[in-house]
């Protein structure tokens, strides 16, 4: 958590966001077969198309509710290198 990112964010490429109707700051849902997590979109050209970077924490009892609920580890199989989102 920081002043720079007061809420959990997911970085998405500008063109990927446009194709999905996502604007900077929109609340979006990341989904995998394991579950879903809500985060705010951070639209940028600083990430390659087809990838995301989720800034959520591992959950827990500390911090604002949005951060406590942003456990991206729940979405991924830790035995794999990546999961499609």
Image (cartoon, helix red, strand yellow):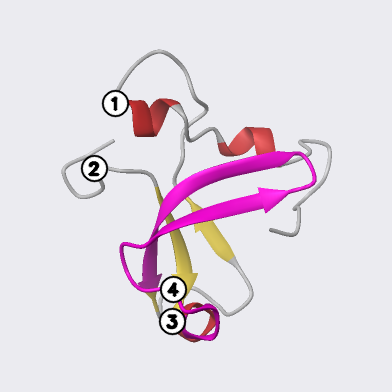
Is the C-beta separation of discs 2 and 4 under 8 Å? no
Q: Give the mark nearest the N terminus, 3 or 1.
A: 3
Find the distance from the CA under tag 1 to the CA under tag 4: 24 Å
Callout 3 secondary element: helix
Marks 2, 4: nearer the viewer = 4
Which residue sits furthest left?
3
* Above or below, 23 relative to 6: below
Question: Which is more toward the observer, 24 or 48?
Answer: 24
Residue at image mark 3: 14
Find the distance from the CA under tag 3 to the CA under tag 2: 21 Å
Q: Position of residue 71 (x, y in %)?
A: 54, 32
Q: Give the mark nearest the N terminus, 2 or 4.
A: 2
Q: Which mark is residue 22?
A: 4
Callout 4 secondary element: loop
Magenta part of the protein: which range?
Answer: 18-43
Q: Position of residue 6 (x, y in %)?
A: 23, 42
Q: Residue at x 36, y 62 (%)?
A: 26
Q: Which mark is residue 6?
A: 2
Question: Which is more toward the observer, 43 or 36?
Answer: 36
Please check the rendered image and state whether residue 65 is part of the magenta-colored stretch, yes or no. Answer: no
Q: Give the mark nearest the N terminus, 3 or 2.
A: 2
Quarter occupied by residue 65:
top left
Q: Residue at x 66, y 33 (%)?
A: 74
Q: Residues within 10 Å of mark 1 (few under 14, many from 20)?
A: few
Q: Give the mark nearest the N terminus, 1 or 2.
A: 2
Marks 1, 4: nearer the viewer = 4
* Above or below, 63 relative to 48: above
* Above or below, 51 relative to 70: below
């Amino acid at each position: 958590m920081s002043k720079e990112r007061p809420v959990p964010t997911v970085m998405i490429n500008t063109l990927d966001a446009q194709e999905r109707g996502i604007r900077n700051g929109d609340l979006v849902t990341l989904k995998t077969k394991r579950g879903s997590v809500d985060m705010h979109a951070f639209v940028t050209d600083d990430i390659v198309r087809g990838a995301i970077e989720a800034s959520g924490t591992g959950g827990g009892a500390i911090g604002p509710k949005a951060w406590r609920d942003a456990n991206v580890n729940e979405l991924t199989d830790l035995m794999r290198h990546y999961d499609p989102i």
